[in-house]
Image (tube, helix red, strand yellow):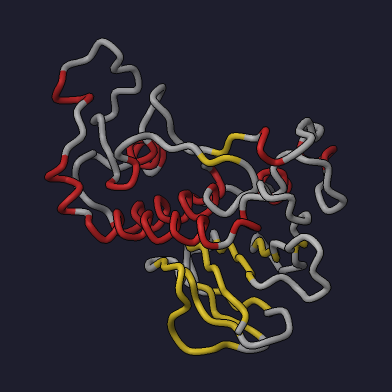
Amino acid sequence: LGFVNGGTHLENALRYGITGAVAHPQVDYDAYGSRPWAKEPGQSINYVSCHDNYTLWDKLKCVAPRGDYAAPDADLLAQNRMAAGIYLTCQGLPFMQGGEEFARTKHGDHNTYRGPLELNRLDWTRAAQLEELVQYYHGLLEIRKAYPELSGMAGDAEPCILSLPGWLIGFVPERQGESLPGRLAVYYNPECTRQWAALPAGSWRYLCDGTRAAAEPFGPACRNAIELAPVSVTILKVE
């Protein structure tokens, strides 16, 4: 989680996840501290929260730190969206805790297996209050279904990682057996300010702009470079 809330020098950890723990020439395994172990991306499970330990929202609140776990927070919602955008664009098999899509909170309790119903239940009132976040997750899942090269589960070629300045991460998920460049480009911007990034050749439109996600392109076409929103994942499709 450190990448979404200001951690630095994590680019090889991100590259390791993007490539599904499969050997890849653009990952510095010595710098990361672990060797590739998967023969194919489907052996790698990607997640940022599960039934054990903190919910994603509570972890973000603890790190920030913020007091009221139930209170919405614009900065932490951006970090939540970015965390989801990262693991849902990495090759491998995604896994998520129920309720993550509406910032599920257990009010800072990291071990509720014997806790009361009030802590372990799914709060559907909160889901309605955070409908925009729910729809963002829904859009990301639709993108992942529509573009299987993101998962690498259909024998797709390895991602091509782009050379970008600072802590920006960008990659193009290639498709197996195609001579043309990949049809998607994905960017991670962990900075608290807008950042410019170069685009591959072509005309590109959004599938995800950091707050909205959809399987069908939206917004104006971009060429040459794009301005990335702060603390965001951007997914583009070439026209």
**Quadrant position of residue 97:** top left
For the C terminus, the image quarter is: bottom right
Q: Residue at x 57, y 54 (%)?
A: 89
- Residue 115: x and y in percent read 22, 14
Q: Is residue 76 above or below residue 197?
A: above
- Total number of numbered discs in the rendering: 0
Q: Residue at x 41, y 66 (%)?
A: 213
Q: Nearer the viewer, residue 26 or 140?
A: 140
Q: Is residue 143 above or below residue 1?
A: below
- Residue 53: x and y in percent read 40, 23
Side of 86 where 63 appears, left or right: left
Q: Is residue 54 above or below residue 186?
A: above
Q: Residue furthest top?
A: 114
**Quadrant position of residue 174:** bottom right
Q: Residue at x 52, y 56 (%)?
A: 144
- Residue 219: x and y in percent read 44, 84
Q: Residue at x 58, y 40 (%)?
A: 93
Q: Nearer the viewer, residue 16 or 33?
A: 16
Side of 165 where 226 appears, left or right: left
Side of 140 where 94 appears, left or right: right
- Residue 153: x and y in percent read 66, 46
Side of 100 where 156 appears, left or right: right
Q: Nearer the viewer, residue 211 or 190?
A: 211
